[in-house]
Image (cartoon, coloured by chain):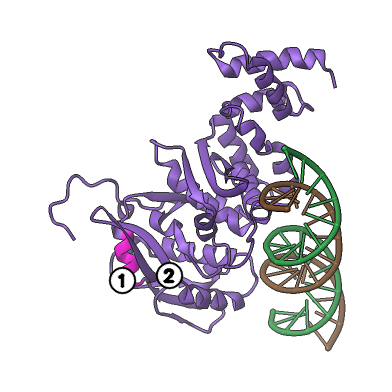
Chain colours: A purple, B brown, C green
Amino acid sequence: MAKDVKPKPVRTVEARPNADTLVKPGELVDLVEVTPLTLADRRIYNQLLENAWDAIDKPVTHVISKGDLRGSHNSNDRVGESIERLMACIVKVRITRDGAPAIERVQLLGGNIESSRRDGLFEYEIPTRLRKIIKDSTVFARLQREVMFALSSKYALTLYEMIQKRGKLRWRSSERFSLEDLRGILGVPKGKLTSWSNLKLRAIEPALVEVNALSDYVVSVEPIKTGRRVTHVELRWWAKDASGTATAERELQFSKVGRKQRTQGDTLPARPGWLEARGQALRSETYETARLRHPGFDIYHVEGEWRAWAKDRAPATDPDKAFLAFFRTFAERNPL
DNA sequence: CGGGTTTCAGCCAGCTTCCG
DNA sequence: CGGAAGCTGGCTGAAACCCG
């Protein structure tokens, strides 16, 4: 550890959870490789981290009631299985050490004791090396517990964590991943979802729908091709405006029954790839406005028409307004 | 023809209901 | 009350289908 450190950036350890949020080290989100964990496992692990947070940097044994861990399941039987999976899980963590990239390997969970009483306590330790990772964190994610518990797809939680972490990074709002990295980060088991189409359909899209509906960020994933093959994706995100955040909060109050219908009806489909090739996406509010003003129209089709129309003209000073103006005339000329 | 998308049926986890 | 059985919906790979 270098002694002559410059002014330190915010460190994960300095961020304390409050009633509504819990904090998870940013580095843990970028799992390069992980043995498959279920959604319940991840939730339990986050609970354990939060519970230990006040003394996370000390070599002590933490204690939590098993009742707090079992979530909605009406017995403790699965807690033990989750704990075993967590202990067996060895993660490779991509870190920066003295400016150079490095890979660190560590178990998620140290030794522990599970009392056999039904309402018993669970004692556990955070591995030393993991504590060090937490201490060295320069990026942190603030996880809203309510959102975390509402997410139902196992990939949605991971995606949400990624965005929470990256959302704090003001100086960028997109990042490129190779498909292989993305599978690793999302925790897709080895050998599963090997084709892009299946990966998109089964992992990415369900996760996007949920995260967009329930978090305070809007997220999109665009495929990037090398030749004809999709080899990378561009992950973009931006903060929702106030009304979007309010909608997400309101949705969290509802039962999750029927959420699928509501969120799907409420979320714009992803911008198709062929449009991407013809110009940069407009602001999300613009699409939202267009959708509200002209319900029933295929927004991306109209955008295509607009791009074709505008191709030979001087670029508009305000493309968003120009598009909305074009949309109005288009809707008048082509009533549904 | 290569590659992406849609559809299908099997499988499994989680939840609810039933029964002792 | 606790466990077993049954149900439901999501996840999955494969195969059919579609497109440039």
Q: Earlier in the sequence, mark 1 or mark 2?
A: 2
Disc 2 residue type (three-letter)? Leu
In this figure, which residue is indicated by the disc labeled 2?
A108
In the image, the segment drawn in magenta is A127-134
Against A317, residue A145 (above or below) is below
Position in image of residue A204 (x %, y %): 62, 51
The local crowd at label 2, few if under 14, some if 14 to 19, many if 20 or more residues have their Cα within 10 Å, is many
Q: Residue at x 72, y 42 (%)?
A: A264
The local crowd at label 1, few if under 14, some if 14 to 19, many if 20 or more residues have their Cα within 10 Å, is some
Disc 1 residue type (three-letter)? Thr
Tag count: 2
Position in image of residue A222 (x %, y %): 58, 42
Displayed quadrant of residue A322: top right
Displayed quadrant of residue A9: top left
Q: Residue at x 29, y 46 (%)?
A: A10
Q: Main secondary structure of the magenta part?
A: helix
Mark 1 falls within which chain?
A
* Position of residue A253 in the picture relative to residue B7 (left or right): left
Q: Residue at x 40, y 79 (%)?
A: A111
Q: Is residue A131 magenta?
A: yes
Q: Which mark is residue A292?
A: none
Mark 2 falls within which chain?
A
Displayed quadrant of residue A13: bottom left
Closest to the observer: A308 or A47?
Answer: A308
Quadrant where the image shows the C terminus of chain A:
top right
In this figure, which residue is indicated by the disc labeled 1?
A128
Under circle 1, the secondary element is helix
> Can residue A58 be seen in this snapshot?
yes
> Can residue A252 be seen in this snapshot?
no
Position in image of residue A115 (x %, y %): 49, 82
Closest to the observer: A171 or A315?
Answer: A315
